Amino acid sequence: MRELLGSIIDVRDDGGRDRYFADDRHRWVLHRLWIAVGNEAVAYSAAVDVERHRDEPWNTLRRLRNHLAHRRLPDIDEDFVWRTSQLRPESLIAQVEELLGAREPF
């Protein structure tokens, strides 16, 4: 998950907001990375038996995955995805590292 979140940071920083809204492929790469992060959160939740519909950050990541994976492209709130890509990856890395501690790779 750390690598996926790092990839979100790399893609996000490669061109900024203007490229995100102008370049469909760039935007869809970010969508796919967030879906992959959500898939990892769901898999981790199941593996360690936490409530993925309630426990954080797993629930937030699952909901974002569902938002992106189960909507038509015109129905996705692109401003929300862009803001999430700007504000969340670094804090998620810190939050997940704190939850898992140094014991478990993620």
Image: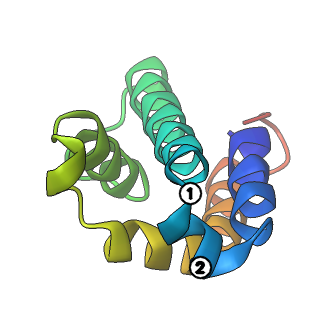
In the image, residue 80 sits, relative to residue 7, either above or below, namely below
Number of residues whose C-alpha sits closer than 10 Å to that of mark 1, classed few (under 14), some (14–19) or many (20 or more): few
Q: Residue at x 64, y 65 (%)?
A: 89
Lateral position of residue 33 relative to residue 41, left or right? right
In the image, residue 40 sits, relative to residue 103, either above or below, namely above
Of residues 65 and 97, the one drawn nearer to the viewer in this rendering: 65
Q: Quadrant of residue 10?
A: bottom right
Q: Inspect the image, locate mark 2, and give the three-letter code of the amino acid beneath it.
A: Arg
Q: How far apart in space, not on screen, are marks 1 and 2 (Cα)? A: 10 Å
In the image, residue 43 sits, relative to residue 102, either above or below, namely above
- Residue 17's tag is 2
Q: Quadrant of the C terminus?
A: top right
- Percent across and percent down for residue 26 are 61, 51
Q: Residue at x 69, y 65 (%)?
A: 12
Lateral position of residue 4 relative to residue 82, left or right? right
* Local secondary structure at mark 2: helix
Q: Quadrant of residue 50?
A: top left
* Local secondary structure at mark 1: loop
Q: Residue at x 71, y 71 (%)?
A: 90
Lateral position of residue 27 relative to residue 69, left or right? right
Q: Residue at x 48, y 69 (%)?
A: 21
Q: Quadrant of residue 39?
A: top left
In the image, residue 72 sits, relative to residue 78, either above or below, namely above
Residue reaching furthest to the right: 102
Residue mark closest to the camera, 1 vs 2: 1
| Precedes in sequence: disc 1 or disc 2 | 2
The mark total stands at 2
Q: Which residue is mark 1?
A: 23
- Residue 102's tag is none
Q: Inspect the image, locate mark 1, and give the three-letter code of the amino acid beneath it.
A: Asp
